[in-house]
Image (cartoon, rainbow, N blue to C red):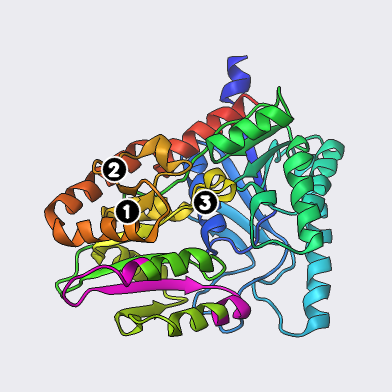
Amino acid sequence: MADAVNKRRNIVYLGETGFPYGLAPIQRQLLLSRGMVESGAKVLVISTKGVFKPGKDFDLAPSGTYQGIDYIYTSGEVIRRPAFLRRNMLKIKGLSQELFLLLQLRKKQKIDVAIVATMRFQSILYYYIVSRIFRFKVLLNYVECNSAISTRTKTKDRINDFLVDRFGICCADAIMPISEFLKNHVRQICKNKPQIKIPIVGDFQTSVNLSNAYSNYFLYCGSASYLELIDFIICSFELIKGPDVFLYLVVSGDKPDMDSFARRLKRSNAQDQIKIFSGIPYSELLEKYRNAKGLLIPLRNTIQDIARFPHKIGEYLASGVPIVTTKFGEISHYFTDGKNAIISEKYDVREYATKMQYVLDHPREAEEIGLRGKKMGKELFDYRRQGSALYDFIQKL
């Protein structure tokens, strides 16, 4: 039995595309893979299609090894072709080559467990069927209560999200929820399903120096699709008082969402004090985190926000700068106001503005809160700790 547990496991990541330079889902994938590799696992990340724009400013081959993690784009390309026909032919190639690759891995006994990370029910079901045929186990990454996402209003999305939350979580040998809410949901739907809660992860070894230049700004980083949260932050910022204080918004998204964001910004009476950044290098983003006075991540008292645990919080904590948030969901399980975070009791513009004002009025206390937040994050959310725990779970699966 001990030999079975200690045997090196071959783990394949399926469902995401954009490794290793994508946004939060890819960064979670990257960090957990790094943690497992450092614990002795063999990890292969499979992407079925290219997503990067032509003329990208980094060199990425269609297959190779990145930070100890093997990866492959089964379409043979990492870029997203602008021509419709060519792009869709590559999608078909990517899917067929992925299936062939899984077959080859099974024949060579180089796949034990697949971590499936996708919100599409048909993909979850497809990978589960393939796993039954090729005889490997599936661990489903579960990070959202999909049916509670308010912006997904199309009929096909609502049907998909219901199927994921009700039946998709049953199409796996085990579940990897990110929050207590999702953990309890899995227990209600699939009572005896093995699961391991893996919260946010971060790299707390990264060191970014403080800038010598004067900086007096709050920062929010997120998707333009969270327009309600951005509106909340702008309204709160308009209420605070301070000399030459700015709001940095690092925002990206599809054109319709970015257009809505731009229209909202034009309505602000503080737009001269708001600076917008989009598509900046990750190293520059980390510098902006480190030099901010406070990092903003308000969460609403909704099922959507109670169920999720934004990856951004891990990045924020690693900077050592205090996070300014609200008490809902996972925040209440890990954070205490004035100790390791600055927390508003309610999702209220005026109360949140008061918490932002506290950062300006009590800089030394705020700095200490940020450092305690980083210390707690390193103890609980470091990718090495979480990757090791995940690999231990997989070895016993």
The answer to whether residue 207 of the structure is visible from this angle is no
The residue under the point 81% across, 34% down is 135
C-beta proximity under 8 Å, tags 2 and 1: no
Q: Residues within 10 Å of mark 2 (few under 14, many from 20)?
A: some
Relative to 93, is 7 on the left or the right?
left
Q: Which residue is mark 3?
A: 28
Q: Earlier in the sequence, mark 2 or mark 3?
A: 3
Q: Residues within 10 Å of mark 3 (few under 14, many from 20)?
A: some
Q: Residue furthest top?
A: 1
Q: Secondary structure at mark 3?
A: helix
Q: Is residue 252 magenta?
A: yes
In the depicted structure, whether residue 166 falls above or below residue 28: above
Q: Which residue is mark 2?
A: 337
Q: Is residue 40 magenta?
A: no
State the CA–CA distance, disc 2 to disc 1. 10 Å
Give x and y (percent) for residue 81. 71, 80
